[in-house]
Image (tube, grey):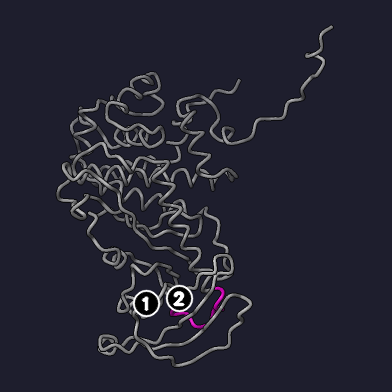
Amino acid sequence: MTHHNTVFSQILKLIPRHEFSVLANKHDGQRRSDAMNRWTQFIAMATAQLTGRSSLRDIESTLVSQRHLKYHLGSGSIKRTTLSRANQALSSNFFEELFTKLYTRCQRRTPKHSFRFKNKLFSLDASLLDVSMKVFPHAEYNRMKAAYKLHIGLDHNGLIPAFAAVTVGKVGDQTQAKLMNFKKGSVLVFDKGYSDYCWHNLLTSKGILWVTRIRGNAKYRVLERRIVNKSHGVTSDQIIEYTSDRSSKNNLRPVRRVGFRDVETGKHYVFITNHFDWSAKTIASIYKQRWQIELFFKWIKQNLRIKAFIGNTDNAVMTQVWIALCVYLILAYLKFQAGINQSLQQMSRLIHLNLFTRRDLIALFKPPPDRVFNSLQMRLL
């Protein structure tokens, strides 16, 4: 019978250990021999993400019960007090940089998006992560609650997070979007929360394409009206110019305004974009794909541990969120590399149930072989 290490050990092998060690030396330097190292910290927090552990005590008891696997995991001893100190003291910037390296590695194997154009397509959005106002008073979002905010730039090649930031809840969506460094030719799609016409103008000057919805109070005049095919749901296709005083001062370029009625829901949408050549239906289809980032936030909140935090400092919260994003990229890399047909939802459930079992990782996601049922065994002779 073929020997296999645990499913968890095989998942950890997907992380390039040499790069991990180089990164740890860069951020932490030489640490005491009895201090918790980055690898042990990552194993402990990844265990929480993959098994749904909700406290330091849960993580400790889970790994203590699997102490015989310590050698295969390559970890040191894990105590909840030591893990708590590590999450507070060791900078979360390490895991932020690890996230970037994992994304770079993952995108080499991602499938392409469904559109004909070859440009990279990104969706931008942010989601609140509620926390206790008593524990995190500095993260006050409003009078009723405190929250952190997870900002994401989702790559539609594989639907994986390419850019991410964790801030307190009051930080505006646009503030972080302006810090994301998109390459020339990229296509961005975002909702009205990013309606900053000066920023749109800046993106255009950088050669970055974008699609969003127009503000209801936008002032403009029509420069050109185009013929539309109403059978495709397109109601208007115009070139417009903003006419407000602020627009004139900032020398905003003309943009394209596209009206579209969804056949299924009957709702009418008005989009604006700086691309003048794609069909109006393509513009509407690009914006429709923005829904994928909503599904991403839903998935990560349901399947990973970013709704309840096991630390009470900014660094501990950010460490937990960054490790969750790293685990997401590892699962995505496994899916793309092995050509697994099951969804990430199904994969995470199977891993949850089999994390410490000794069996082939890839075989875990293959359907069991069909067995021929012998009806003679059921006969009473």
Residue position marked by numbered label 2 in the rendering: 271
The answer, for residue 170, to whether it is visible in the render is yes
* Residue placed furthest toward the front: 266
Frontmost of labels 1 and 2 is: 1
- Residue density around tag 1, few if under 14, some if 14–19, many if 20 or more, within 10 Å: few
* Residue placed furthest toward the right: 381
Q: Is residue 119 left or right of residue 88?
A: right
Q: Position of residue 250 (x, y in %)?
A: 27, 86
Q: Residue at x 43, y 80 (%)?
A: 274
Q: Position of residue 252 (x, y in %)?
A: 33, 86
Task: Say which element carries label 2.
Answer: strand
* Residue placed furthest toward the top: 381
The answer, for residue 118, to whether it is visible in the render is no
Q: Is residue 297 left or right of residue 377?
A: left
Q: Residue at x 40, y 87 (%)?
A: 254
Depicted 281 relative to depicted 304: above or below: below
Q: Quick one: quadrant of the C terminus?
A: top right
Count of numbered circles on the image: 2
- Residue 46, quarter of picture: top left
Residue position marked by numbered label 1 in the rendering: 216
Please give the range of residues in magenta.
270-282
Q: Residue at x 42, y 58 (%)?
A: 154
Q: Disc 1 versus disc 2: distance between alpha carbons?
A: 11 Å
Residue kind at label 1, given as amino acid type: Gly
- Residue 77, quarter of picture: top left
Foreground residue, 107 or 377?
A: 377
**Does residue 241 show up magenta in the picture?**
no
